[in-house]
Image (tube, grey):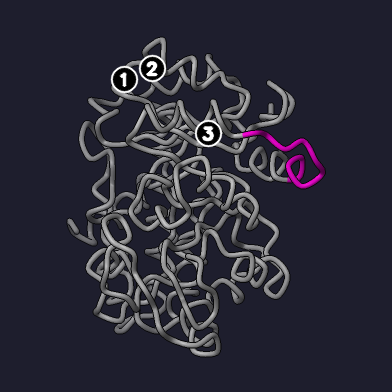
Amino acid sequence: MSGLAANGALGPVMLDVVGKELTDDDIRRIQHPLTGGVILFARNYDNRAQLTALTEAIHAARPGVLIAVDHEGGRVQRFRTDGFSRLPAMRRLGEMWDSDVLASMSAATDVGFVLAAELRACGVDLSFTPVLDLDYGESGVVGDRSFHRDPRVVCALAKSLNHGLLLAGMANCGKHFPGHGFVEADSHVDMPVDERDLKSILGEDAAPYEWMGLSLAAVMPAHVVYPKVDKNPAGFSKKWLGILRKDMGFQGVIFSDDLSMEGARVAGNVTAGARAALDAGCDMVLICNSPEKADELLSDLNPKRDAASRESAMRIASLVPQAPAPSWGELQQDPRYQAAKKTVLSLGDA
């Protein structure tokens, strides 16, 4: 049952939970009408049984809510023990491409399938992946999270990874539009500025978003300012999100990046940031690692009840898997999973 059918329209806020079990305050926030998603972190994980119990509790508190995680592979993988496969950094697939194109595309599909199948077996609906940033060798925060320097390679490998996600019943989220790879600064702690012009960015970094078209289910903009295009970071920019929606024809969900990051502070306090992101064209805003700011946002954000907000709620609900996932035990007996896992193991630890 979709989020819309189960519990009314999903709200535009995705927030986190404090620990490995839900507190009364967690439940209160999850059940708030503005909440539409919950994002998990490594601090929310002890083992598979605990994770499954946590996701079941979240879904019980708010049927149909979208549960997500940053689980890309390499250094960005929240769950790593108790049977979870150690996924390679995406650069490893790009290195394979340089020697064997077909093998790299097949491996990317296997990685996507294992990634999604293991998460879904534990009740997680979505991973914020793939990273579509180009590897210019400048950005430490992107680095080996990127497939490759060539946008054509990034597009091909991301499409293959997304096919694997889809085989396991999971949607995808390309990030960080229009591109974070060219700038050195980390938007978690700084305000990156990319001085290139629009033509340069569209011809390189943003190209995979246009080429991937309908195969992208969701997009997360970068907390990066491109002053020759707009004074606002991409996630708060009507111009950038207009390019994504109108010029590129993107029809999926647009997530803001975390509003608690340094790169989001230019918009003001958390409520002003959320409103700026939603007004610019985001469907859902993320607030992480601050229960106080989450409470502030849920209390102060005045919800819109117009056609655009209803369309956003429908887009968000479309990311919630419709078919039940195999249990962990059933997954271990799946020949397709076993073959894909063997490929993942052969790629080595990231």
Q: Residue 35, position in %: x, y?
A: 56, 29
Q: Label 2 is placed on what type of residue? A: Ala
214 w.r.t. 338: above or below: below
Q: Which residue is mark 2?
A: 53
The percent position of residue 316, horizontal first and vertical second, equals 64, 42
Where, quadrant-wise, is the C terminus in this rendering?
bottom left
Q: Quadrant of residue 346?
A: bottom left
Distance of mark 2 from mark 1, alpha carbons? Answer: 6 Å
Q: Residue at x 56, y 43 (%)?
A: 169
**Cβ atoms under marks 1 and 3 closer than 8 Å:** no
Image x and y of residue 249, in percent: 71, 69
- Find the distance from the CA under tag 1 to the CA under tag 3: 21 Å
Residue drawn at x 57%, y 21% is 32
Q: Is residue 16 magenta?
A: no
**Quarter holding residue 247:** bottom right
Q: Nearer the viewer, residue 322 or 32?
A: 32
Q: Earlier in the sequence, mark 3 or mark 2?
A: 3
- Residue hosting label 3: 37
